[in-house]
Amino acid sequence: MRTRPILFIMILIILATSLSGCGILRKLFGRSGQTDYPYFCSAKKWFSYVEYKAKLWRPDAVFYGTGDTEANLDGEARKWEYLFDSPEANKQATITLQGGFISLREEGRIALTSVKNWEIDSTAAMLKAQEAGGREFLLRNPNAKIFISLITELPNSRKKQTAWFVKFQGTASMYYILIDVRNGGVISSQEVNFS
């Protein structure tokens, strides 16, 4: 009779870990989940957890942007690379969130400007980018890929400003838009032909 409650508790634990996005069961059964995990999320969705991991890495860790990642029309991605800097240790780290897992890669330091007042998430930035010409570009280039990153230095400029850099990349041209992270305003946009 005593084994019944224990069995019930074990089943509840297994169900809870499998439904929570935890990778424990996938690891036990040999599936990492990193290549076929269908979950898309915005850049901010798990940022507090990523930032917590960065502070465990180095207490003085400062966030300074995201790497370029392929995104969907909602501004969500399967993989986000968050870039952190530790001035005290003279190192930087890339914290990758992919497939329900998180990993940290430590690298040499490149001094960059930290992200401040990050109020606009990737989802709002993508919507604004579509309104500012991205949608028209996609209609002309239906197979275009979409990339997004959070940057602190504007391209082709030495101006330091935190912005979402959204690129719609077709086979013969690319359309990029810079979106202000504080108010969602369009900083600039440009179409570039590859030929």
Image: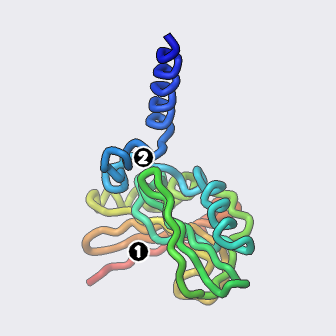
Q: Residue at x 61, y 70 (%)?
A: 163
- Residue 16 in the image, given as x and y percentages of width and height: 50, 32
Q: CA distance from mark 2 to mark 1?
A: 31 Å
**Location of the C terminus (image quadrant):** bottom left
- Residue 165 in the image, given as x and y percentages of width and height: 52, 70
- SS type, badge 1: strand
- SS type, badge 2: loop
In the displayed structure, does residue 194 sit left or right of residue 165?
A: left
Q: Looking at the image, is mark 2 or mark 1 nearer the viewer?
A: 2
Q: Residues within 10 Å of mark 1 (few under 14, many from 20)?
A: some
Quarter of the image holding residue 88? bottom right
**Camera-side residue: 107 or 188?**
107
Above or below, 108 relative to 188: below
Quarter of the image holding residue 147? bottom left
Q: Residue at x 32, y 49 (%)?
A: 31
Quarter of the image holding residue 133? bottom left
Judging by the rendered image, the residue that carries numbered circle 1 is 191
Above or below, 134 relative to 85: above
Q: Residue at x 64, y 83 (%)?
A: 112
Judging by the rendered image, the residue that carries numbered circle 2 is 39
Q: Earlier in the sequence, mark 2 or mark 1?
A: 2
Above or below, 118 relative to 151: above
Q: Residue at x 44, y 47 (%)?
A: 23
In the displayed structure, does residue 9 sit left or right of residue 49?
A: left
The reply to whether dot 2 and dot 1 touch (C-beta < 8 Å) is no
**Camera-side residue: 98 or 190?**
98
**Camera-side residue: 165 or 100?**
100
Above or below, 112 relative to 120: below
